[in-house]
Image: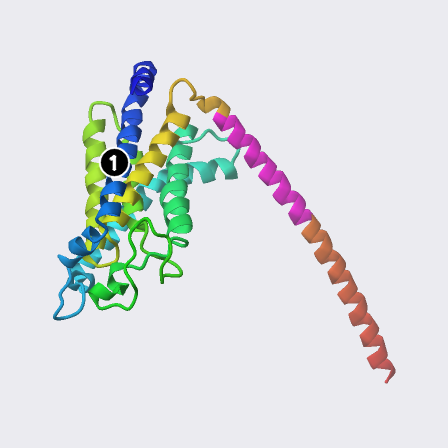
Amino acid sequence: MRWILRVLREAKPVSRGWLLASIASGLAALALGILFAAYPHLDIQIAAWFFDPDAAKFPMASTYEWNLVRQIANCLSFLLLLPALFALLRKLAFPGTPMLIAPSVAIFLLGSFLLAPGLTSNLVLKENWGRPRPNHVQQFAGAAEFQPWWRPSGACERNCSFVSGEASQAFWMVAPASLTPPQVRPVALGAAVVFGASVGGLRIAFGRHFVTDVLFAGVLTVLIVAMLYRLLLNPVRRNDARLERAIERTSIALHNGTGALLARLGTALAHAGGALRQTGQHLHKRIACL
C-alpha cells in the first residue's frame, strides 16, 4: 500500500487518473475473479434471465431492432479510429508532410485498438480459451458442458465465449475519451465505461456471452489502454517530434523497399517477356518451314 501511495504522489496530474484506473481495474479483476471462481453458476443464473425455456432460445438475439442497435454500436469505435488511421497512412504515403494528428495520439489510438480488442481479446483469448457460449451449453438447449471462466478447456474450438470481443471493442472507447479536455474527461470516461457495459449487456441478453466474459473484457481493455496512455502520452516521456521523425524514416524505408521490389519485378518481367518473344519467333520460323 505504501508503494502505491508513493507512486501516486510522484505521478504527473495528467496520468494520475489513469494510474488509479489501472489499480482499480486490477483490484476489480481480482475480486470478480475470486467471486465467480467460487460461485461459477452465477454466470448461468444471470444468463437465464434472458432465456425463454418454452421457445428454447434467447429472444432478443432474433429481434431486428436490437440487432440494429448492436451494429450501430460496433461501428462507433471504427468511426473514431478513422482519423488516426488516415493521419498515419497519409504520413506513410507522403513522408514529407506533417501529420494531421499528433503522432503519439494516433499511435495510442491505433495501438490500443490493435492490442486490446484486436490481439488480446479476439486472437489470443477467444481463439484459445475454449469456453462455450451460453447458447451452446446444456442449460440453454445446447449440447456443450458449461465451463467456468478460469477453465480454458471446453468444447469450443474457435471464436469462443471468453472474452467478449465486441464488449472489448466497446470498452476501448475509453481511449478516445481519455483525450478529451480535462474539464469533461471524467464524464467522457464514465460514458465510455457505460457504453462498454451496455454493449456487453446486449451480448449477454443475446445469449452470446456470460457476464464474466464481458467483465474481464472490460478490465483487460482498460488496463491495456491505461498502460499505453502512460507510455505514449505521459508528458515526461512524450516527444511527438522524435516520434514523427521515426515514422518518417520508416515511411522512407518502405518507399525505398517498395521501389526496389518493383524494379526487380519489372526486370524479371522484362526478362520473361524477352524469353517469350524469342520462343514465339522460334515457333513462327518452324511453322513457316512446314
The secondary structure that most of the magenta stretch takes on is helix
Residue occupying the point 44% across, 31% down: 99
Most extreme residue toward the right is 289
- The C terminus - image quarter: bottom right
**Magenta highlight range:** 243-263
Residue drawn at point x = 42 percent, y = 22 percent: 238
Taking depth in this image into account, of 61 and 66 the one nearest to the observer is: 61
Q: Is residue 161 above or below residue 80?
A: below
Relative depth, front residue between 47 and 12: 47
Q: Position of residue 51 (x, y in %)?
A: 15, 62
Asked if the magenta segment contains residue 2, the reply would be: no
In the image, 101: left or right of 263? left
Residue 69 in sight? no
Using the image, determine if residue 88 lies above or below residue 43.
Answer: above
Q: Position of residue 25 (x, y in %)?
A: 28, 34
Left or right: 85 in relation to 206:
right
Q: Given the image, on which type of amino acid does mark 1 rest?
A: Ala
Residue at far bottom of view: 290
* Residue count near mark 1 (Cα–Cα under 10 Å), binned few <14, some 14–19, many ≥20: some
Foreground of the two, 220 or 76: 220
| Residue located 21% across and 52% down the image | 43
Q: Tell me which corner region of the image, top left, top right, bottom left or bottom right, holds residue 64.
A: bottom left
**Image quadrant where residue 159 sits:** bottom left
Evaluate whether residue 34 shows in this view.
yes
Tell whether position 248 is magenta.
Answer: yes
Which structural element holds mark 1?
Answer: helix
- Report the number of discs: 1
